Image (tube, rainbow, N blue to C red):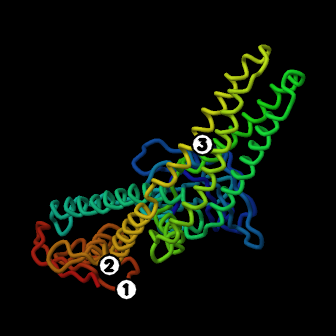
Amino acid sequence: MEYIREKTTSQVVCGPFMTTGASALASAVVLTTVDEAVIQKHGVTAVVSVTAATWSTITNLTGYFNLEITTGMSDTPGRLDLCIRDDDVCLPYTKSFMVIGAQVYDSLWGSSSGAYPSVNVMQINSQASAATALEGHISSIIAGITSMKAETSAIKAKTDNLPADPADDSDIDTQLAAIKAETALIVADTDELQTDDIPTALSGLDTKIDAVKAETALIVADTDELQTDDYPTSIAAIKTETTAIKAKTDNLPVDPASETNVNANETKIDAIKAETALIVEDTGELQVDDTPTAIAGLDTKIDAIKAETALIVADTDELQTDDYPASIAAIKAETTAIKLALSTISSTALMDSTYEGDYKLRDYLRLSGAVLFGLSSGGDTTTLRFRDMADTKDRIIAEVSTKGNREVMTLDPA
């Protein structure tokens, strides 16, 4: 019997067709009478006419034809019978097929390696409680993995803000160099303000002050950027994230809190503070100069520059108070715990876990598969046999009474 996938258009081979009188093989199938060429579906009284169905010849195989089975013909699982009795075309012809569910069909002949039939395990070894316990164990494992993903995401959010090599001062040096260059421009601009003839150069003063403010804003943006956390909006798989964390923490020095490293950074920050103090001093001088009445609004603009410069001082002071070595040490400890937890979970361990007696999870699946999908024999006797999926041996031999009650069960899950 040929198998057909449910609700799927397919071609089946039919034949041989003999002409009326059985004198020769038919060279074509052209059906004319509607009720003399039909398909009978399983459990359905009404028949489906195949008079208008598509028949095509098979090269070098006279008398055999391909019939197109449409979705409307294969929409009912079970036996499907083709019956043709058109006296003008050929001798009577019948052929039977078996329509099976798409999921079961794909699990047997599908090309996808992931095509497996869905199974709801209600009992294991006739015990509903065993199936419930298995579901509980799996739910606990999934919950544990979800929790670890959340913790790893929190760790990654912190380490993403570290440079690729936390022990490398080059990134800090580059940023400090940029701040120093911009600060030098500010010093040059404020020096220039004191030497210009302000009453006669009033028309260009506003432009210069705006330039100073724009450069100061860049400094504020640069220092703010050092403290801004860039939290990711999406997180990759646990393994990828843990690898990224380890790649960064491996580059840390043996002692991240080394006084030498801390003192080196403090020296650079002190230099910035000294230059910023010069800016404050210069802008302070601007407020005591005897400027003309026409530039009465100048003090307000200079005060704004001082306020923004004060923000720079506050930001650089904050950089010295953050406890980065302690944060990095905490991240390494959490990463180690995650790696240890992940290393103890494997699909093999799950499949080899014991749930009842001496039987493991993989034993229950093999025995269940034999009953659900394997071949069987002895249906009309007191000895029932259920074969494994490869049909190489008996997985289960059940001795039953005349009423079908199980009396002796011989199991072979190996």
Which residue lies most toward the right here? Answer: 200
Residue in the picture at 74% in, 59% down:
28
Q: Amino acid at mark 1?
A: Thr
Label 2–label 3 contact, CB within 8 A: no
Picture disc at residue 387: 2
Mark 1 or 2, nearer chain start: 2
- On the image, the x and y values in percent for residue 62 come to 73, 69
Q: Position of residue 304 (x, y in %)?
A: 65, 28
Tell me, for residue 339, which label it has, or none: none
Secondary element type, mark 3: helix
- CB-based contact (under 8 Å), mark 3 and mark 1: no
Secondary structure type for disc 2: strand
Above/below status of 323 relative to 167: above
Is any atom of residue 39 visible in this view?
Answer: no
- Nearest the viewer among 408 and 282 is 282
Point 44% across, 64% down: residue: 325
Q: Residues within 10 Å of mark 3 (few under 14, many from 20)?
A: many
The circle drawn on residue 312 is 3
For the residue marked with disc 3, what is the amino acid?
Ile
State which quadrant residue 48 falls in: top right
Residue 396: image quadrant is bottom left
User: Mark 1 — residue?
Assistant: 392
Give the Cα distance between marks 1 and 2. Answer: 7 Å
Q: Earlier in the sequence, mark 2 or mark 3?
A: 3
346 or 242: nearer the viewer: 242
**Relative to 226, 368 lies left or right:** left
Residue type at mark 2: give it. Arg
Q: CA distance from mark 2 to mark 3?
A: 79 Å
| CA–CA distance in space, label 3 to label 1 | 79 Å
Q: Are marks 1 and 2 in contact (CB under 8 Å)?
A: yes
